Image (cartoon, rainbow, N blue to C red):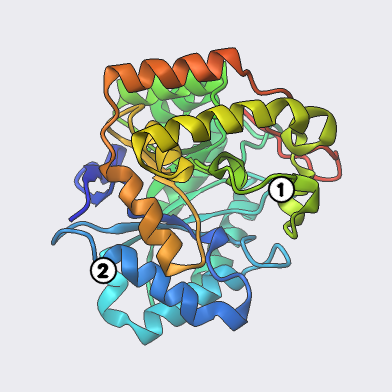
Amino acid sequence: MVKTTRLGGTAKDVVVGKVANTDSSMVGLAWAYVYDAFDTIKSGIDLLPPGAKMMLNSSEFYGPNWDIANIELLARFYEKYPEYVDKTFLSGAAKSFGLTSSKPEDLRRSVDICIKALRGTKKIDLFEPARIDRDVSIEDTMHALVEMVREGKFDHIGLSECSAATLRRGYAVYPISVVEIEISPMVYEEETKRVIAACAELDVAIAAYSPLGGGLTTGMIKDPMQTTGHWIKSLNVSQPENWEYNRRFVEAFAGYAAKKGCTPAQLSIAWVAALGEKIIPLPGSSKKERNLENIRGGDIELSPDDLAEIARIMKENPVKGNRGLATKAIDLKLWG
């Protein structure tokens, strides 16, 4: 039975798996693998104690063509396995990647698209703008989201890629339940630490996406430019001028994982989980076996000596290149 934790804000009574959750943008994007995705989701839920839920992180743009296909996949899952509906906590997000808008009409459009794609199989538990729209005040964004909560379109509000200052301003309008940010041993910026501190102060849970650094901390990727995944190739840290430097960290981290008797992926997840009681790693996998391997990372206990050694490895092998994309074709608008 896996560890659990509680969410924050208006969802403070919701219990979710500490690690038995998934960023479903990485689950079964191709329809050919739909039943693999179903087995992956079920395998995590089945490990949870009674009353706990799996957090499923989806979005209007998580399909293979930045479309609604991922939520449609989840609708098919709920139709096939209605007994699992109440065992999941579904988080949805508005458009992103250069298409972010937090104008009230655009947020409402996005929510309605997601609701329609679910076909009545499941209510959205939490909704968040996928990025902070710098052309709309966070107060106006929150008021628009609160209005839809009161209309019953979804139950809780989250923010993604927000700075600590933006989180505090948003929370002053309405309690935020979850903040979604990227955290991994390769991505631990100063603003990341400030957001973690603010969330702890306000009792907000953190959904830590990409805890494996886009797969780079697993040690399995020897040359990102030779992978089949275009996403990894597009990362700034994966570029040849940076990777020759960054692989030293990956190798040192993998070496310590071997000493601990676990995989580098499991050590990454354990390290992220150890950063705070309500920090919830969101690894993504389309395979049941890999999902179960990731979940076992939550069982790894890191001692103060372990954390000190990992901190030493990170300090002596600082990551070169930021966590954005090498191309400006897509503007991620990080840290709003």
Disc assigned to residue 86 = 2
Q: Give the percent coordinates (x, y) of residue 278.
A: 30, 35
Q: Nearer the viewer, residue 261 or 52?
A: 261
Q: Give the percent coordinates (x, y) of residue 39.
A: 40, 75
Which residue lies at the image location 85% right of the left edge and 40% below the top edge? Answer: 327
Amino acid tagged 2: Asp
Question: What residue sits right under mark 1 in the picture?
Answer: 232
Q: Secondary structure at mark 1?
A: helix
Q: Is residue 67 visible?
A: yes
Which residue lies at the image location 28% right of the left edge and 65% below the top edge? Answer: 45
Which residue lies at the image location 61% right of the left edge and 61% below the top edge? Answer: 62
Q: Is residue 137 above or below residue 49?
A: above
Classify mark 2: residues with Cα within 10 Å, few (<14), some (14-19) or many (20+). some
Q: The N terminus lies in which quarter of the figure?
A: bottom left
Q: Nearer the viewer, residue 103 or 310?
A: 310
Q: The C terminus lies in which quarter of the figure?
A: top right
Going by the image, does 288 lie left or right of 107?
Answer: left
Q: Is residue 333 above or below residue 32?
A: above
Of badges 2 and 1, nearer the viewer stands 1
Q: Is residue 177 above or below residue 316?
A: below
